[in-house]
Every structure is written in C-alpha cells, then in structure tokens.
Amino acid sequence: MGRDLPIEAIVRSETVESGRGRAALRGALRAGQLGLAVGGVACLVAYALACAQTAHTQARVSEGFERAVRAQIEREAPDTREWSAGRVARFEALRGEPVQAVARLEIPRADISVMVLEGTDEDTLDRAVGLVEGTAQPGESGNVGIAGHRDGWFRGLRHLALGDELTLTRVDGVARYEVDSIRVVAPSQVEVLAPTETPTLTLVTCYPFYFVGDAPERFIVRARQVSFEPWQRGEATLASVAR
C-alpha cells in the first residue's frame, strides 16, 4: 500500500498549480488587453480614413460645384424685359466677375432661376440674389433668408401664390419648398428673418414692385421645406442640373 504524501508536499503542489493558474490568467488578460488595444487603434484608423475620404469627397464635389457656378453665372442669360434699365446695365457690367455661390434658387411660377451668393451688398444684388447675413446657411436647419432687387431678379415674385414650389440646389442635393405665406411688411419688421425651428426659406424684396425711388415696404415670401433629395454617390454638381 502506497504512502500518503506529506501535507507540506500537498500544499506545495497546490501552490505551484495555483501560481501556474494565476500566471495563465494574467497572460490571458494581457493578451485580451493587447487585443482590445489593437482593435481600438484599428477602429480609430478606420474612422480617420473614413473621415478623410468624406472630407476629400466633399472638397472635390464643392470644387466642382464652384466651377460650375462660375461657368453658369458667366453664361447667365435671364429674361430682363421687366427689369429696370439701370439694373440691366449693372448686371451686364458685373458678368464674369469672380463669385462665391452657396446655392441656386429656382421658382418656376416666377420664371426665376438664379445663383444665391454670399451677402447683400450692391454688387452682389446687381448680379444675383444674396444670402442675408445672420440667417441660416442653405443646408442648415432654420430660416434661410435671401434678398433680391424688385426691379431685377425678384421682379417675378409678384406672380407667386400659396402652394407654389421653390427649389434650392446645393452642393449636397436639392431642397424643395412650398410657399405657405406671402405678405407685405414695414422695413423695421426684421422678425421675418428670425430663426425658425424647421427648415424655412424667406425671400425678401422691396415693395411696391413698380415705385419711383426707394420703395417704402418689403415683400416677404415664406416657404417651408417639404423634401430633400441628396445626390446619388455624391458625384452630382450644379453642371448636371443647371438649366
């Protein structure tokens, strides 16, 4: 009959086995931590590459949009029969000048198809319509304010009616709006350009449309966004949709 091992040997054996178990557990934990770290780095690299690709695509599309904008405004041939003679002369004098456009506004009922430029200074409004400073940028949620001259690009606004469609072609797609209010206000009623919770487009011009001298009131067209159609594959530019 074999002899039982001394209690000290048994303890030593269990201690060795326990140590080996703890070492194996530590090794497994270190391997897991390393795997998580490697996975985290891989995710960060993938995210950075995706962001870089997105930025590159947007830069390429934006550049194409700007080139198309410049080409379009250089060959712009609006129907100026209802414009004032002075406005026609200033428009022709400014054709070919460098531009920085943010969108294209189209209103079929008013026979309007015009670039939207930054700002509302005289030179800007003599050649196109302008984004009102302090209002939302096209593409942002809020109130996009656009101003134009009553004896130039915005002469046709007087033909609009409730429910008429407007479109704003942007670098990322086409936003469609529907007119939901038309009114005449005093120049001091700047609240018409206040921020809104929903995507809104507000067009501003002087009123009456046929008035000698500085018109005393403002004609306001308010439209709400009803849909947005992004470009497929992010490759479309103004050149593919310009009329």
Image (spheres, rainbow, N blue to C red):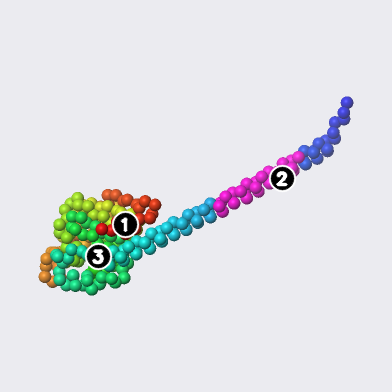
- Secondary structure beneath dot 1 equals helix
Q: Sequence order check: which comes first, mark 1 or mark 2?
A: 2
Q: What is the quadrant of the C terminus in the image?
A: bottom left
Q: Which mark is residue 240?
A: 1
Relative depth, front residue between 237 and 226? 237
- Indicate the quadrant where residue 191 lies: bottom left
Kindly check if marks 1 and 2 are in contact, taking CB atoms under 8 A apart as contact: no
Three-letter residue code for mark 1: Ser
- Secondary structure beneath dot 2 equals helix
**What's the residue at 23%, 60% (across, down)?**
113
Can residue 142 be spotted in the picture?
A: no
The part of the chain drawn in magenta is: 17-42
Q: Please rate how many residues cluster around mark 3, counting C-alpha atoms within 10 Å: few if below 14, some from 14 to 19, many from 20.
A: some
Query: What is the distance, in whole Å, between disc 3 and disc 2 at their CAs?
Result: 78 Å
Placement of 208 over or under 233, stated as above or below? below
Q: Pointer 2: what residue?
A: 23
Give the foreground label among 3 and 2: 3
Three-letter residue code for mark 2: Ala
Relative depth, front residue between 28 and 163? 163
On the image, the x and y values in percent for residue 172 come to 35, 56
Q: Sequence order check: which comes first, mark 3 or mark 1?
A: 3
Our reading of the magenta stretch's main secondary structure is helix
Callout count: 3
On the image, the x and y values in percent for residue 86 come to 16, 72
Q: Sequence order check: which comes first, mark 3 or mark 2?
A: 2
Kindly check if marks 3 and 2 are in contact, taking CB atoms under 8 A apart as contact: no
- Indicate the quadrant where residue 118 lies: bottom left
Q: In the image, 56: left or right of 87?
A: right
Q: Which mark is residue 76?
A: 3
